[in-house]
Image (spheres, rainbow, N blue to C red):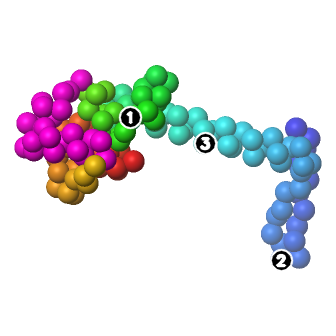
Amino acid sequence: MNKPQIVHTPAGEEMVVLPKADFEALISRAEDAEDILAAERSLARIAAGQEELITGAEIDAYLDAPTPLAFWRKKRGLTQAALAKEVGVTQAYLSEIESGKKEASVGVLRDLAKALKVTVDELVG
């Protein structure tokens, strides 16, 4: 890095002039630091159980599932009957929600999200 030049404005404010390459290097380091902090925050959320990772195969399964609800139920290893019982709905109704034939009420979505340990947003896609 070249030595920066300090200049003064007519009002006496100090300004720093440096070569563009040095400025870009500073910006790049700042962006790298932001990326590192974001990664550390994400790792902390994972360690605290507030966030989870999914594999590439699971991403494919998510994309192939008829609804996010179907993906999350299968990922959690639950049958429709078990999840329906836990949430207090019939298996037939849950099947229709999973296939996209029926929409769940906000209350049912909230209960499903709680049972599957996801947010409502993760169930509605």
Queried whether the magenta region covers residue 20, the answer comes back as no
Could you say which disc has been placed on residue 45 in the image? none
Q: Position of residue 76 (x, y in %)?
A: 26, 27
Q: Secondary structure at mark 3?
A: helix
User: What residue is shown with label 1?
Assistant: 65
20 or 62: nearer the eye?
Answer: 62
**Pointers 2 and 1 in contact (C-beta within 8 Å):** no
Mark nearer the N terminus (2 vs 3): 2
Q: Main secondary structure of the magenta part?
A: helix
User: What residue is shown with label 2?
Assistant: 11
Say what amino acid the circle numbered 1 marks: Ala
**Pointers 3 and 1 in contact (C-beta within 8 Å):** no
Marks 2 and 3, how far apart in space? 34 Å
User: What residue is shown with label 3?
Assistant: 34
Q: Position of residue 63 (x, y in %)?
A: 45, 35
Mark nearer the N terminus (3 vs 1): 3
Q: Secondary structure at mark 1?
A: loop
Is residue 32 something that shows in the picture?
A: yes
24 or 67: nearer the eye?
Answer: 67
Tell which residue pokes out farthest to the bottom in this image.
Answer: 11
Q: Position of residue 16 (x, y in %)?
A: 85, 57
**Looking at the image, which residue is at 37% across and 31% down?**
52
- Magenta region, residue range: 77-100
- Marks 3, 1: nearer the viewer: 1
Please indicate whether residue 56 sits to the left or right of residue 113 in the image. Answer: right
**Pointers 2 and 3 in contact (C-beta within 8 Å):** no
